[in-house]
Amino acid sequence: MADLTQEEWAEQLAQDENAVILDVRTEEEVEDGYIPNALNIDIYKGQGFLDEVEQLDKSKNYYVYCRSGARSAQACTLMNQLGFENTHNLLGGFMNWEGDVIEE
């Protein structure tokens, strides 16, 4: 897992053709806005989270975020244990995100 600042995360993401953005927040949090093209799997689902993540393509590079960076770090660790090699945690999370946001 790599902890990336906002700038590093956005820069690497822009250059990564094999990227998947993963939002591990709750549905309620996602309704307040999310990063474009993000896939949402709520880490609070516990086993449900693990089951859904297991279905993902392990050859992709995952850019993971939550509200503040704590849950996404936990998600990256879990994903690494499941065999995902490339996970990137967004330091500061969505609270500090200055890039594009989609609000419903």
Image (cartoon, rainbow, N blue to C red):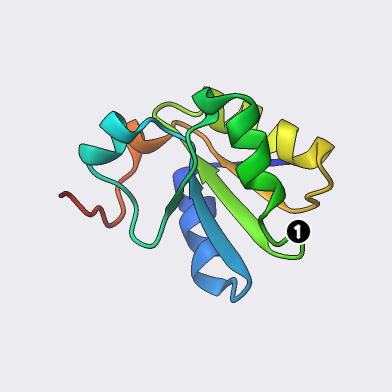
Mark 1 element type? loop
Residue picked out by circle 1: 58
Q: How many marks?
A: 1
The residue most toward the left is 104
Q: For residue 68, which quarter of the picture?
A: top left
- Front position in the image: 56 or 10: 56
Position of residue 51 measured from the top left corner of the image (x, y, whole percent): 66, 40
For residue 15, which quarter of the picture?
bottom right
Residue at image coords 65%, 45%: 53
Furthest toward the bottom, the residue is 17
Residue 5 at x, y percent in the picture = 52, 42
Tell me residue 37's x, y (percent): 39, 62
For the point 67% across and 60% down, which residue is it? 61
Q: Is residue 57 above or below residue 3?
A: below
Task: Using the image as rendered, state which of residue 97 and residue 102 is in the foreground.
Answer: 102
Front residue (pair 66, 10):
66
Packing grade of label 1 (10 A; few <14, some 14-19, many >=20) is some
Compared across the picture, whether 16 is left or right of 92 comes to right
Q: What residue appears at the point 43 percent right and 34 percent down from the top-left corner?
A: 93
Q: Residue at x 62, y 54 (%)?
A: 62
Give amino acid for label 1: Lys
Name the quadrant containing residue 16. bottom right
* Image quarter of the N terminus: top right
Residue 74 place in picture, x, y as percent: 64, 26
